[in-house]
Amino acid sequence: MDIDNFLPEFRKWQQQIAEKLQGQTKDLENYNELAKCNILLIGKTGVGKSTLINSIFRVNLAPEGAGKPVTGKLTRYEQKECLIVAFDSRGLELTDGELNQYNTESNKRDVEALIEGSHKEFQNVTIDVIFYCINSNSERFEDVEEKWITDLREKHNNIPIIIVLTRTIKQPELHDLFIAIKNGTAVKEEKLKSLIHCITKTDEIIIDKNKIPLIPILAVEEKISEEYTSPKKNLELLVRQTASLLEKQAKQAFISEQVASIDLKIQEAQKLTAVYTSVTSLIALNPVVPVSGTILPAAQLLFLKQISSIFGLKQEEQELLLLSPEYQALAAAILTTGASTILTSLVPLVNSVNDALVAGTSTSLLCLAWIDTLKRYSLRLVDEKILTEEEIRKFIEIFAEEYQKYCDKTKYS
């Protein structure tokens, strides 16, 4: 592209970004209106669907006893301020050791209606992922189950399906059912056998949407004897696999609400930080927009709020932290003596180039320090209680420490 044509277009693009960012910062209250993530649970009664869903997220979605045999229909589980909605198909009931055909067909019709958005009670729902749960202690993989999984994949290949082998107490490789499914001896249908990918923690996460991951898990510790309690297994693996298959908006909601992998939250926040750093730097290159003095502080507040949502902070807690006198005083000090001082001491740049470096660097330092603070506070953030004034002060103290560490690294690197 000719440079004379490129620069005007580049300036125009910069201006558009700046205007969009200005619009966002005018109303910080609605910054994190993320779409919800809808999860469909399928499996026999008592297989552990409610235990699974409650173990993954920061709130208990399914009430105790939800897995007991009931004569009901599709059930919707959701909690206030939680971005996850779980739909539990009625359990596949057994009659004389065999799956009840009438119950199964009725259940399948309910599920199909939900997926297609025509369910009478839950219309226009978009299912983002399906967890098909099978008890690893089962003696066999039911014919009707393998048929149903095959049908779901053929009719709805745009929806990720994950087969979850629940109550995997022994090492996955030693479970008879896991071995049988992996070797194909538990699956008679060639179509399904070619679709299943058995995964343990030693395997790579697969993102191939044409494959159905099968992941063995133990959602809660299980006492085996007086001497031994089996620890949880592979919840983080399940969470990472699910996140890799979800579409963008559902993925953001899922990562925000899950508590099985803090590292996944950190990685997502670091990706956002790279974007924020680039955007603020590019905007600052535009001399028309005084980013350092006007947009930057509000934009950085917005960025910290968005990162906070990844770690599951309620909006009320975000406001308490970021609008607290302690944070406001720290932010004011950072703006006057933080990244700007560091950069000008390194290289005396001027005008928009200097503005871009200050904007980008200060944004990066703030976000990375905020992530490390949230990481240190991660166990507390799972608690549903609102932060106390003392906890807020402690949080800001930790943030100041982490920010100073990054400033020091910048000075001497």
Image: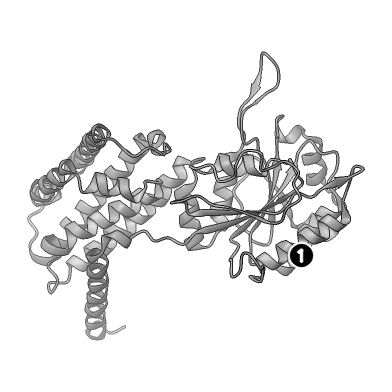
Tell me the quarter of the picture where residue 287 sits.
bottom left
Q: Farthest residue in the right direction?
A: 96
Q: Is residue 258 above or below residue 73?
A: above
Residue at (66, 40) in percent of width and height: 200
Colour setup of the view: one colour
Q: Is residue 157 visible?
A: no
Mark 1 neighbour density, 10 Å: few (under 14) some (14–19) many (20 or more): few
Q: Is residue 17 visible?
A: yes
Residue 257, given in percent of the width and then of the height, sits at 47, 48
Three-letter amino acid code at the position of disc 1: Arg
Residue at (66, 43) in percent of width and height: 66
Q: Which residue is mark 1?
A: 109
Q: Give the side of residue 209 with respect to residue 363, left or right.
A: right
Q: Is residue 178 above or below residue 153?
A: above
Residue 222, given in percent of the width and then of the height, sits at 66, 27
Looking at the picture, tell me which residue is in the foreground, 397 or 356.
Answer: 397
Looking at the picture, tell me which residue is in the foreground, 397 or 97.
Answer: 97
Q: Give the side of residue 320 with respect to residue 258, left or right.
A: left
Q: Name the element at disc 1.
A: helix
Q: Which quadrant is home to the N terminus? A: bottom left
Residue at (66, 18) in percent of width and height: 228
Q: How many marks?
A: 1
